[in-house]
Structure formats: C-alpha cells, structure tokens
Amino acid sequence: MDVTRRTILTATAATAALSFVGAPHIARAALPLTQPGLPFAEDALAPTISSKTVGLHYGKHHKAYFDKLNELAAGTRYADMELSEIMTASATSAEDAKIFNNAAQAWNHVAYWDQFVPGGPARPDGELATAIDDTFGGYEGFVDRAVTVSNEVFGTVWVWLTRDDQDALALIGYEDGNNPVALGRPGYLGIDIWEHAYYVDYENRKEEHIRAVLDKIVNWRVIADRVAA
C-alpha cells in the first residue's frame, strides 16, 4: 500500500490527531519552533550512519524544515500551534501543502533521531517481538518486508511501522514527507529513504542501508514504548 498526498487530503480532521510516546517534544508551543538537539553525539551511529551524514542530515536538511516552517506559518492560524498540531491541522488543506510538507518533515525527523538513542536492545523482545513474529513471520521477515515496501512507492519515501485499516501491525510506505500520524494512525518506527539519509555512506545501495539501520542502530525499547502507548 503506498500513501500519496491525495490519500492525506482525504483523511478527515477528526482522525488526524493521533500521537505516541516518543513523539517530537518541542520546547515552544508556538512559533518560532526550535529544532531539538540530537539525543546523541554526531558520531554515535557510525559506521551504520556516519558522522558526516548525521551532520548534513540533521544540521542542513532537518534544520531547513524548521526554518521554512517558521517562515511559512508566521502570521497564519498555525502560529500558536505546536509542531504536531500544525502537521495534523494542515494535512487536509490543499492550500497549505507547503506548510504540511515542512511540518511533517520536521516532525518525522525528530521521531527518527529519537528512535536511535544508543543503549537500548538491538532486537525487539517481549510482546513486540511476538507481534512482529506473528505479523511478518519473524524478525528477518520484518526486515525483508521493509525492503520490499521501500520499492513500492516511486521517488522519495518513508517506510513506517504502523497499523493498517484492520488495526494490524504493518509496514507502509509514504510518499515524500507524509506519515501515518497525519492519517490518524500511530507511527512506531520510521525509516527515512530520501537520498540525503544514506547516499553519502551507501551510494545507490538502498537495501543495504535499510538492513543496516534495522539490524544495528534502532533502540527497540523506544519502539516498544511507542507501541505500548
């Protein structure tokens, strides 16, 4: 299942307010929004994600989403909202597509960095491990499915561990900066597959990047907390 901007626009505002434990925590609940600091040193994810990639990804790309959002949302109805509110409120507005795109990408990346906090288990355990085994036929099946889903959406994509229309655990690909939370679904784990997330380290080896991220740097305690929330 691929999720496009058109899908986002068909979601109702009533279903676009879901969040989860570990979602972005922004110090200010009004503009200007401030990009949170990384929860680890820039070299903490190396060699899976190099310090150069983290520096560019966080310091240039992620920062740019916050900067552009503050510029676009100034003087609008979004000016007094926190980041997640801006994202969900703008998700159904075609005229505010640029605001949504930047809010969603700002939000996506905070959730992304938070899931890599070093020190947690490298594999799911407990109830989450059981759910992944039941849904994907084991952890390796889960990783294989993430790779498959990454190829189901043309162009830039995020792959999110979320829930489907039947409320079952699922990996779903979202076009551009779209995400499940804007559709009223939980976002448990997000894999950024925009080229700036991996090309410095992996060049065109996208599958290698996805497998390395899932195998080596995800803090599964964070993911389990999000699923249990």
Image: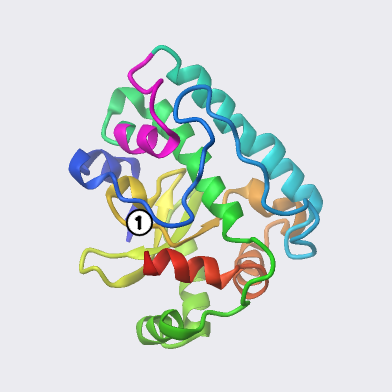
Was residue 81 drawn as part of the magenta stretch in this picture?
yes
Residue drawn at x 43%, y 20% as measured from the top left = 73
Residue drawn at x 48%, y 22% as measured from the top left = 31
Judge from the rendering whether residue 167 lies leftward or rightward of residue 83; answer left or right.
Answer: left
Was residue 85 drawn as part of the magenta stretch in this picture?
yes
Q: Residues within 10 Å of mark 1 (few under 14, many from 20)?
A: some
| Residue named by callout 1 | 2
Q: How many marks?
A: 1
Judge from the rendering whether residue 92 lies leftward or rightward of residue 208; answer left or right.
Answer: left
Q: Position of residue 229 (x, y in %)?
A: 37, 64
Judge from the rendering whether residue 185 lies leftward or rightward of residue 40; answer left or right.
Answer: left
Q: Quadrant of residue 55?
A: top right
Q: Position of residue 167 (x, y in %)?
A: 24, 68
Q: Which of 12/126 is in front? A: 126
Q: Quadrant of residue 115?
A: bottom right
Up/down of 22 relative to 139, above or below = above
Residue drawn at x 20%, y 69% as measured from the top left = 166
Q: Which of 154/33 is in front? A: 33
Q: Which of 165/209 is in front? A: 165
Q: Position of residue 197 (x, y in %)?
A: 65, 51
Residue drawn at x 56%, y 53% as measured from the top left = 112
Q: Which of 63/198 is in front? A: 63
Magenta stretch? 76-89
Secondary element at image label 1: strand
Q: Position of residue 178 (x, y in %)?
A: 40, 45
What residue type is disc 1 on?
Answer: Asp
Quadrant housing the N terminus: bottom left
